[in-house]
Amino acid sequence: MDFTLPQYDPFRMLPEIFMLLWALWVFTYDLITKRQKEAAVGYMALIGPAVPLLFIVFYLTGLLPESWRYGGSGFGAMFFNDTTAMFFKIVFLGAAIMAIGSSFGITKQKIVNHRGEFYGLLLFSTLGMMFLASSNELLTLYIGLELTTIPLFVLAAFFKDDKLSVEAGVKYFVIGAFSSALLLYGMSFLYGLSGTTGLVQMKMNMAVVFLSYRDIGVILLGGIVLLVAGVGFKLALPPFHQWAPDVYEGSPTPIAAFLSVGSKAAGLVAFGKIFVNGLMAFFGPEQAPNDWGMLVGLLAILAMVIGNVVAIRQTNIKRMLAYSSIAQAGYIMIGMVVLNEHGMASVAYYIFAYMFANMGAFAAVAIFEDQTGSCQIEDYKGLAKTSPVFAVSLSLFLLSLVGIPPLAGFLAKYKVFAAAISMATVDPSASWLYWLVGVGVLTAVFSLFYYANVMRLMFFSNEEPRHKITYSVPALCVLLLGLAGIVVFGIYAEPILKLVRTIPADFGLYIP
Amino acid sequence: MEKEILTLVTFFPLVGVVLLTILPRDRHDSIKGFALIISFVTFLFSTWLYYMFDPLGNGMQMEVNIPWITSLGISYHMGVDGISLLLIMLTTILTFLSILASWNSIKTGVKGYYISMLLLETGMIGVFCALDLFMFYVFWEVMLVPMYFIIGLWGGPRKIYAAIKFVLFTMFGSLLMLVGIIYILFEYQKYSGVFSFDMLKIIGELPLSYQAQLWLFGAFALAFAIKVPLFPFHTWLPDAHVQAPTAGSVILAGVLLKMGTYGFIRICLPLFPDATITYLPYICILSLIAIIYGALVAMVQRDVKSLVAFSSVSHMGFVMLGMFALNTQGIQGSIIQMINHGISTGGLFLLVGMLYERRHTRLIEDFGGIARVMPAYAAFFMIITLSSIGLPFTNGFVGEFLILLGAFHKNNVYGIIGATGVVFAACYMLWMYQRVFFGKVTNDENKKLLDLSWREKVILVPLVLLVFWIGVYPKPLFEILKPSVNLVVEQMERAEAVRLDDDYRVEEKLTTVEVGNNELSFDTEEQSDE
Amino acid sequence: MAEPGIVFWILAVVTVASAVMVVTLKNIFHCALALILCLFSVAGIYILLNAEFLAAAQVLIYVGAVAILMIFAIMLTSNLASKAIRQSNEQVMVGTVVSVLFCGGMLALIYLTDKAIVSEETGVAFWRQVRGTLPADNVASLGGYLMTKFMLPFEVVSVLLLAAMIGAIVLARKEKA
């Protein structure tokens, strides 16, 4: 037995350590101020993700001193900072900042006793996502995913007096536990086949096993189905999506936003790490089982169709956004099944653009809900007359979700479609990707229908608006941050594109 | 300056957008004034562009090519040739005139309206300048949003239906085009090893297989055909035109429809020459159907505006017919006709709008004898009507004549059927004119109508001048168009020659086979004889 | 690997039967008792697989703590133990079909790994290939790994537990008006 501690470097975990300590400080701060400070707790919580975000951004832009080597292994194979990890950490932290920023309204009115816990759990969940992004190994990955979801169960049910919120919490808890079990079961298949939990080692071991057992793909397929189902629940990919609308509707709006962006991005990372990286040995037509691509492609088609079609009928804007995010997951999965140097890069850019647009849209919904208590699309009638800034920004977020240039959402859709076509033009066995793109295009037109419906009500309604929106400073900042994101990264996308270009290399999709 | 002029023309309206955003909402007069000034200055810039343009120069002029998103091969590549120059001129004139025309008719949401108009102008000019497929797509989509709001916010009673229908139709087509663009990108990358959306490079270098051309032509042509609109994709047009506010209809008919035909001539023809020749008969037949169908439906309309809208379908059929004649006369005529249609249909929509502002109805039966009450109005209307019909010495004649000439060159049947369209046009336009303007004033309300104000005359005079200028002395236009049109025609002739060559070869093969068979049978006969 | 003996089959039958009882019995108290039985026999299977630590943990945590806690909760809640409950809804058929399919799939996989999937060189079935030997002291090496190679996830689990604890307190706490 070799019981030596792996090479470790706590410095590489600095953002995580900071987040952990800061989350504890937020709990404590709320207690020592006797739960009297309303906004101060929120501002305190904002520092939690902001400092690590700046740290990572500074590192990536080269503003940190040369000697601060943040990238690389932090704890053997358990913790590794590559571009993927850092990029997705930026997405998680950005989503957390925007979620906290749009929570000031509910912590003022509804959550009066547990503000510290609310923010602290949000930070814990973000921490789990960060561990997940850095993991290169099934065990850390699983624990990261659990640390992501368990605080979210609680956060979804945070309005204890509200039946819908409690229902959301319970539903999310049951589904989450079930999907975790499926995931774990699937992982045990991978472990059984390869004898290791490290993803890179797993890849190699499986290739060796495959040499003497040519038919092993059948077993792998069993594991793949379980894993797809497990992650599919987290990503709300049909047919595992039914929980999403109920949970989004019931849970506090910023939490719904965080679920739809942060938790989804976490699921994507997990999916990418397990499938794109871990099962990479089996890619290639002559090397047999690459069946997960087709399977996931099918789910993506289902997601785009179901998400976009059902969203049209929704009357509650949170449910509509839930179905829209189901559809968006479908578009993202198009990029995921493309196993070349464009695939994961497009996924990363998509989630980045989606983060700004979706968090922004939810932030707008949260602002509206805080002031009117309503989430009905009907109530948005005529808002353009009284609150033009609100109406214009919500419209821009929705337009970015549709993918209208020059907003970032357009470039994102472009990237995933381009990735799929890039593979289909080269590899004749991948020509089914054209169908994926075709469905994507068609359903994108459908999506315009329900997004435009909200805009129609806000701008075109002749009725006198019932509400006028006033903004609190943090909420306005979140709106502006989202707007800046979709506009700036739509027009000046070069730095982000340069960054995501190296991501497929982290998944072993090509050698730089 | 030569480098920056295109950027200036394209993005100057955005300066106005920023300016208007800052202005307070209730300062209507200054908002209108600023919008007008900005659009006028844009027009001046475009005339400057016109003077700087060298009619003898080949290829693109005033080119700018700056890398934008290098990792995707997207660059800020703009340039104009004769075709785009004329369309840019048309855009700037019509935008200026329609902003002037909206002076009194838009009373609510003034600020948003003028912001949308200027945004739209940037999008339209951008489409005509872009030489990078990605930029082309971006501008193409960008104008969708302001147009959606212009129809949906300031339109008629069924405006929302019309706006959503317009957007859904266009979006569907353009997304297919996006898929096509991406496909071309990767084909080009396979061919040359670098990513590039550069239209000129792709057209000049990329060899596309016939099969690929067929699919890509389909994707692009659908996007453009919806915009033109070619029969049977025209159903959004009557709704959008009728429901849009006057200025919206003017821009829609005058410029937006041209983007479809411009797309055909800029992208479809040069990039997919072989597919063009394959699809040619179908497109010609669809254009002929559009010509006849549009005219017949226009004849039975009770609303003047929808009559003009359906006449648009018919006229755009002419444009498509001329373009797909694929000879110099046809293409030249089709481009001239694009400009003419912008002037005459734009003018008609403006005129109808003026009448609507006075009477709040557009039904033909509500009018009669208007010529007595509003003589100046009737005169202007007459001139524009005649231009729309294509009377000699008006602009319409030049275009339609050339188109028919080209069509006859291509195929006599096309020419004959097309020519009946002109007859029909005379029927429905003159009949409408007669019912509205002649006879007795039957409706008392019409007796009180005021004739044109000076502002309205200012709007109409430039259009009338253009009608006569192009009708009598179109030479400058031809000179500007010549190099670009020749280029297209040469490309198409080359493709056709190759195609004929192939056909010839196939025939040759068939004959040899036949000869072989004969010989064989001859042999067997001989053998049987033995 | 040895063939499963009679002990395994007894444990397997008990596990499945008690698990079925957990989800079908009408009295919630009986369900909890059946759950204990089920967990116990799973622990027995762990022992058969030479996983003593897992078996001990199973008995201590699941039987000793979780199940007992459940029983306490049931007993302390008034009238819960005497009520008859319905454990299925109208979707029971769908659930049955999915479960049967899933079960069939798993059985097929077990059959395949044990019989059908055979190495081309050695002719040994996938399940039956020998992959190293078990360490002499299972528990000690497990502990060793948790303190060295897997120390990071081990530490993160503590954060996870903290999060769960805080969450449970927040949800369960009675609010002052």
Image (cartoon, coloured by chain):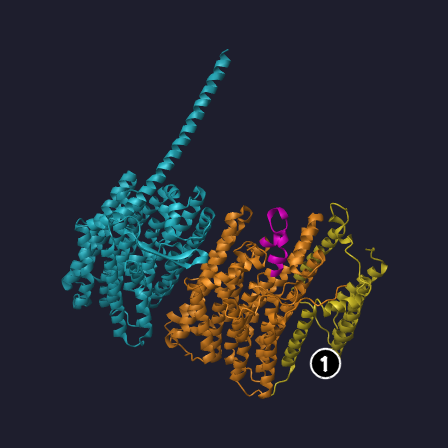
Residue B408, compared with residue B438, is above or below; it is above
On screen, residue B465 versus residue A411, left or right, reads: left
Q: Quadrant of the C terminus of chain A?
A: bottom right
Task: Say few, some or many: other residues with alpha carbon within 10 Å of mark 1 (under 14 / 14 to 19 / 20 or more).
Answer: few
Query: What amino acid does circle 1 point to?
Result: Thr
The tint chain B carries is cyan
Report in which chain the residue with disc 1 lies: C
Residue B213: image location, x then y, percent: 42, 45
On screen, residue C155 versus residue B261, left or right, reads: right
Residue B343: image location, x then y, percent: 24, 56
Q: Main secondary structure of the magenta part?
A: helix
The tint chain C carries is yellow
Residue B428: image location, x then y, percent: 24, 52
Q: Quadrant of the N terminus of chain A?
A: bottom right
Q: Which residues are magenta?
A: A273-293
Residue B77, compared with residue B482, is above or below; it is below
Res C21 visible: no
> In the rendered image, which residue does mark 1 sit on?
C77
The tint chain A carries is orange
* Residue, far right: C6
